[in-house]
Amino acid sequence: MRFLMVAIAAGVCLLGACAQRSAWTVPVQPVDEAALARVAPAGRLPAMARPKAYRVALDLDPRETHFSGYVEIDVELAAATNGIWLHGDDLDVSRVTATAGGETVEASWAEVLDTGVVWVGFPRRLQAHRVTLAIDYTAAFDTGLAGLFRVESQGNWYALAKSESIQARRFLPGFDEPGLKAPFEVAITVPEGMHAIANTPEVSRAPAQPGFETITFAPTRPLSTYLLSTAVGNFDKVDRAPLPPNDVRRTEIPLTGYARAGKGEELAFALDLTPEMMRVFEEMLGQPYPYEKLDIIAAPQWPSGATELAAAITYREGRILVGPNTGPSLLRSVKEIHAHEIAHMWFGNLVTPPWWDDLWLKEAFATWSETVVLEIMEPQGNHDLAAVVDGIRAMSLDSLQGVRAVAEPISRNEDVRNAYDAITYSKGQSVIRMIDTYFGPDVLRPALGRYIAQYADGEADSARFYSAIGKASGQRAIGTVFESFVTQPGVPLVSAQPICSGTSAKIEFSQTRYRPIGSEIAPGGLWNIPVCAAWKDGANTGEVCTLLSAPQRTVDVRGAICPEVVVPNAKGAGYYRFDLPAEYWRALTDDFAALEPREALVSIDSAQAAFNAGSMGGAEYLGLLEASLAHPHGTVLIFALNAWDALLAQLGEEAEPAKARASVALARRDDPSELEAGMRLRGFRAASLHEPEARAALVAEADAFLSGTGELSSDLYTYALRAALEEGGTAMFDKVLAAITRLDDAVFLQAAADSLGSAASPEDAARALDLIYEGGISQQVTFSLAQSLMNNPAHRDRTWARLTGDFPGFTARVPSQLRRNTPRLARAFCDPAVIPDLEALFAAGSRDLAGHERALGETKEYLTLCAAQRENARAMILPVLARP
């Protein structure tokens, strides 16, 4: 492969290019690295250089510790230059040449910043507008599940590339920014018999050195480096019938699954979903799937849930494989994540944000697409309720003063990964859903298809998106609403004051930023909020809507004399919380079982928010929580149980009377008909309420399952393991560890990591920590295991002492992209007294913890708010519970 590239370059020279005046002019004095560091781009690269094409040759043997590579990059230059800024992280570069105007010169390579920012220096000034860089290098396979890493499973070694977000630079020199797209030609030399997967179909296979072969892949269409796929190993390959042509796409698409040896059959569920899911996406957007194939890869280990590598989507096993114990909640999760990743083929891959501050344009739309597509595929699947819950989940983080905006400016490479949070994903999708509901699917969705067609194979930032969507939809206000929500942080709080005159009704809406107890958020805040309120007046019901762009607005309620019940977030469609006068909260509580399910969800959340802000009393809040347990819909019940868990955590050791109230309320209702809700209720009764009968039954099921004599749904794994570990002592701890190996199941592995902190004895908790430090458990779950131990008050202090006593040893065992989140482990204290120790721990900083500052700041604020809200909960709830 390399010989062919060099020969082509030489041929250009023979054809006469070398006779031209040299593109290389005056000599350039070398610049020392200290001087380069002062001017190195900490974030985006300068606009003067842009890649136009890559030709890549990799030698990959997963059985070895190192790999080698060679890359040629055609670069377009905007002006004369002495060198080029690009990326390469911890690469051992042996040679760099630059060819322009038919003349090749030796260039220098200096990694100037720890984030992999590199200066390629030229010996003479380059006047040409085109140059080809050729780079020879080697590197070690990454040990933190980042870049190009290798893992072993059942005696087989696998190599995989985790390119997103800025990790491609760890295995490939290049321009590692999302907007700098270019086509790639790739050849990979691998041990004979191993599968090699890339972004395009294989076009040839030829012998290399003895025992190896070189696989060449078709050229790609323009791609960002973060979308590059490389996977090598003894995978099970599962061939499926190609996706057939349809009214939108004229060609068939090969569909293939890959999993580690012995796991291929567990891809069947996801592969079966794919044809119908693809058809729905293509019809909704009016745009064909943009790539030549679609591979579904279950990675033996993967640091995140999944990554949308173009045409080679790669998943953590526990998020895509479906085995015999898979429960309904996990099946729903597989559908959601698969829809999310397929959505990325258009949102992010085909049309790409130019820089990471517009990450929401791919992640929020992919998250929103989960619900939209699954609602079409399964109209009775309650996917719209899942979207409401997802948006509410973001509001907890969005209630912090120091939270980032959806489209937060990013000026440093270290902060890129911080954009991958609930604000970008969950708040983003909730805002899109609000706009889609208010303006209508027939307005937004066709406009999205036209936007994708306009910017296909290119990039678009938020400003381009607002303009394109406004023009395509004919609704300029859509862009205004989007901008209002994505450029400023915080959760809007909409207060609704019904006004009755005796013959007609109005509602006065006002807005401000939500502010919990203990927060220093300043009053105010102004959004363009699509507000809709559902109302009930006797036998009459309806909705009243307005675009609330001022601090206050009064709207007529047509059809009502004086509404008895008002839910100021109809269908749960708005990204905001609401507040009501006390009498309307009481009416809503009395009518709770009759509430539309989405409106019941946002009512629970808004009541919880009002309680945590000090504007709702303990009796009122407890009454609404009790009423919520009677709602007939399973998703509402699950959400209500989560709210009860939050209250029980606030009450701590004084929670027993609250548990008794919950048990009494649950005894009054029928068991839910939905399997998901039924399993969640079993888990709540056994693990949260400690009801003896429910607990004994679940512990017995766990024991039988761990002993290999019984079955247990994956939806019950965590609840059952926690209860069993609390009751069963060291013998049960040993059974869980043995089952991790025996079951070889990624879902069980994650549940075990989430549960081992429930071990009853300090000795077993210490053994759980040993699993982290001594490599006794998969690296992808080490952070979860540490979190589990921190969440147990009995083990918290000893766990924290050991983690902080050997913090480098701990972080070395955490996947690279999670290390920035290590400050969040201290959230378990719910006490600002730990802040000085936390600050001291991170004061020195390190490359491994790059970007931790946001997690540290958010954790410090959380600790203050948590303590204040816990104090409020105990002061407001305990006296109510003490009443006869």
Image: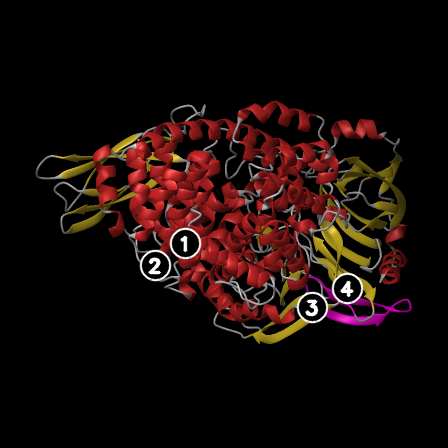
Residue 586's disc number: none
Which one is earlier in the sequence, the residue at label 3 or at label 2? 3
State the image coordinates of residue 33 (x, y, percent, origin top left).
83, 30
Task: Look at label 3 and name its amino acid.
Answer: Pro
Q: Closer to us: mark 4 or mark 2?
A: 2
Which one is earlier in the sequence, the residue at label 4 or at label 3? 4
Which one is earlier in the sequence, the residue at label 3 or at label 1? 3
Residue 681's disc number: 1
Mark 2: few/some/many CA within 10 Å (<14, 14-19, 20+):
some
Element at label 3: loop
Q: Quadrant of residue 608?
A: top left
State the image coordinates of residue 290 (x, y, percent, origin top left).
58, 63
Q: Are marks 4 and 2 in contact (CB under 8 Å)?
A: no
Which one is earlier in the sequence, the residue at label 4 or at label 1? 4
Locate the N terminus by quadrant.
Answer: bottom right
Which one is earlier in the sequence, the residue at label 4 or at label 2? 4
**Which residue corresponds to the image point at 56% horizontal and 23% vertical from the top-left?**
833
Residue 780 visible here: yes
State the image coordinates of residue 117 (x, y, percent, origin top left).
75, 38
Residue under numbered circle 3: 201
Residue 213 magenta-drawn? yes
Residues drawn in magenta: 194-217
Task: Look at label 4 and name its amino acid.
Answer: Asn
Residue 671's disc number: 2
Disc 4 and disc 1: Cα gap in Å? Answer: 41 Å
Mark 4: few/some/many CA within 10 Å (<14, 14-19, 20+):
some
Q: Main secondary structure of the magenta part?
A: strand
| Position above or below: 64 against 99 | below
Task: Look at label 1 and name its amino acid.
Answer: Leu
State the image coordinates of residue 779 (x, y, percent, origin top left).
69, 49
Q: Closer to us: mark 4 or mark 3?
A: 4
**Which residue corresponds to the image point at 50% horizontal and 36% vertical from the top-left?**
405
